[in-house]
Image (tube, rainbow, N blue to C red):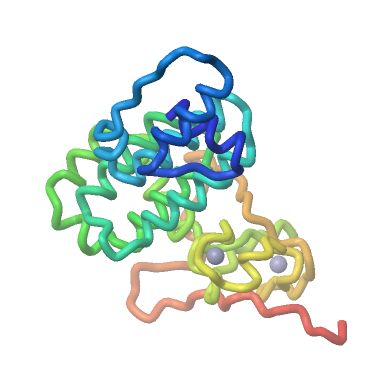
Amino acid sequence: MIGRMLQFLYHGDYDVLNIAADITRLLDAASPSTLFFDTMMLAQDFDFEIQAAMYAIGDHFEIPNLKSASQALFVAELRSKEFRLADLVAAVKLVYTTTSENDYGLRKWVVYRAQQLEGELVRYDEFKALLKERPDFAWDLATKYAKANFLWCPDCECIINLVQCRCGFAGMCGDSICATGEVKSLRCTCCDSEGILQREIPQLDGSFELGVLGRTDQPHARTRKAPKKKSRAG
Ligand SMILES: [Zn+2]
Ligand SMILES: [Zn+2]
């Protein structure tokens, strides 16, 4: 991994497999000592594990470009067709072990992927074990991104459900407005205020009366409409 970091610092990217010869050359240029790299050992790792490890190294040595490069490669792995349920569970364990709790660079992607695959994951025993083993992941899975796909209006205190964005305005779902991260371009469908919707929502205490939500457990209960885009003329 350190070899890959050196490779990144010299070339601006890193190799997953063909690293040994390049690093030997770089280090030979720096020192005349003979170095030996085990190519087979380097080639055995799964790619997403390498990307997550490189992300952790980028964080540790404070190399933001290495973090963003390894994040992009990690996401590409996560979305590849060959990625299996067992890989996703392994990736969650790895990411929630190697990154700090306020670094969501990789965490948000494994959570969002797991939210998209809930139908499959609930049929997989290892996933149940994972939820018990990693309550911090379980909390994120239950409360963030796809599960927080709404914005909050501080004016009318309404929760506005999103329709086009599916990731809670976290820039992962591919929606064009979500990708810009500009909540300000949206208008509250409840009070019609412009540019004040926000992702952060105030905490509640236990005395909050559920009746004020206007939601019941009746079928066909009314739900709030999605926000409208700001008109171009305005
Ligand atoms: Zn989104
Ligand atoms: Zn409002």
Q: Is residue 185 left or right of residue 93?
A: right
Q: Where is residue 122? Give x, y as percent.
A: 19, 56
Q: Nearer the viewer, residue 37 or 221?
A: 37
Residue 42 position (above or below residue 177): above
Point out residue 119 in the picture as x, y percentages from the top left corner.
Answer: 23, 64
User: Is any part of residue 191 visible from this angle?
Assistant: yes
Looking at the image, the residue that sits furthest to the bottom is 233
Picture layout, residue 62 above or below residue 84: above
Left or right: 187 with respect to 209?
right
Residue 198 percent coordinates (x, y):
68, 57
**Residue found at the very far front of the displayed protein:** 32
Q: Is residue 156 visible?
A: no
Residue at 34 percent across and 68 percent down: it is: 217
Q: Which residue is rendered at x = 26% and y = 31% of the image?
A: 41
Query: Which quarter shows the N terminus?
Result: top left
Question: In which of the image's four quarters is ligand 1 placed?
Answer: bottom right
The quadrant in which residue 179 appears is: bottom right
Picture residue at 72% right of the left edge, 63% below the top: 182
* Quadrant of res 193: bottom right
Nearest the viewer among 131 and 180 is: 180
- Please give the count of numbered marks on the rendered protein: 0
Residue 116 image point, x, y percent: 35, 63
Which residue is at 41% across, 16% downward?
A: 34
